[in-house]
Image (cartoon, grey):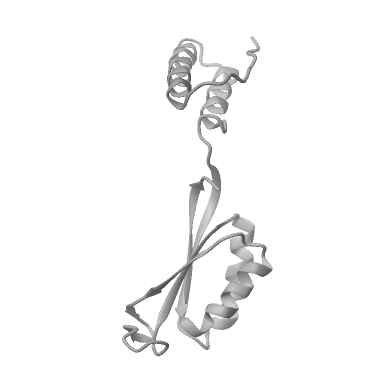
Amino acid sequence: MILGWKAIALSPLEHRRVFQNFGIILLAVILTTPTRTTINLFQDLLMSPEVTPVQPAVLLTIIGETVLQGSIVELLKSYSVKGYTIHQVQGEGGHGKRFGDIAGYNTNIEIKTIVSQEISHGILVALKEHQGKHALIAFRHDVEALY
């Protein structure tokens, strides 16, 4: 059985109702005849951009000394990163306390960006050169993002 898909103009509430009702019917079909085709069809429906407009991505978080801001931003741009967020942060770690109580002295920043797995790997490898000279930590999380 092949199902056709036709785009029609619906409000977000109408879209939700249509997909919920269709999902219930499709789930009933899967439960009564759980073939690979019906399961794949249901998964495709739930993961389609119309229902779930998110994509797999990586949230990359970099925390380091404020003096690194320029070089980190330059690194991100060299990987064609389209956006990032920077915050002044405080804390304590292997390099001591960083309270940022004097502007520009003993301060840290946190930079966050959403990128692909491949780009996050390249950025992490490039950041390794700064790690011995400055306080720096970076980590990533797999996320689903609307971007």
The residue closer to the viewer here, 142 or 8, is 8
* In the depicted structure, whether residue 56 falls above or below residue 50: below
What residue is drawn where x is 52% and y is 45%?
146
**Which residue is at the front of the view, 43 or 7?**
7
Residue 25: % across, % down? 46, 12
In the figure, 121 relative to 108: above or below?
above
Count of numbered circles in the view: 0
**What residue do we see at 55% from left, 46% from top?**
56
The answer to whether 20 appears left or right of 97 in the picture is right
Q: Quadrant of the N terminus?
A: top right
Residue 44's x, y, as percent? 57, 27
34 shown above or below 88: above
Residue 117 in the image, given as x and y percentages of width and height: 59, 56
Does residue 99 appear left or right of residue 125 in this picture? left
In the rendered view, tell whether residue 35 sits above or below residue 118.
above
Q: Position of residue 49 (x, y in %)?
A: 57, 33
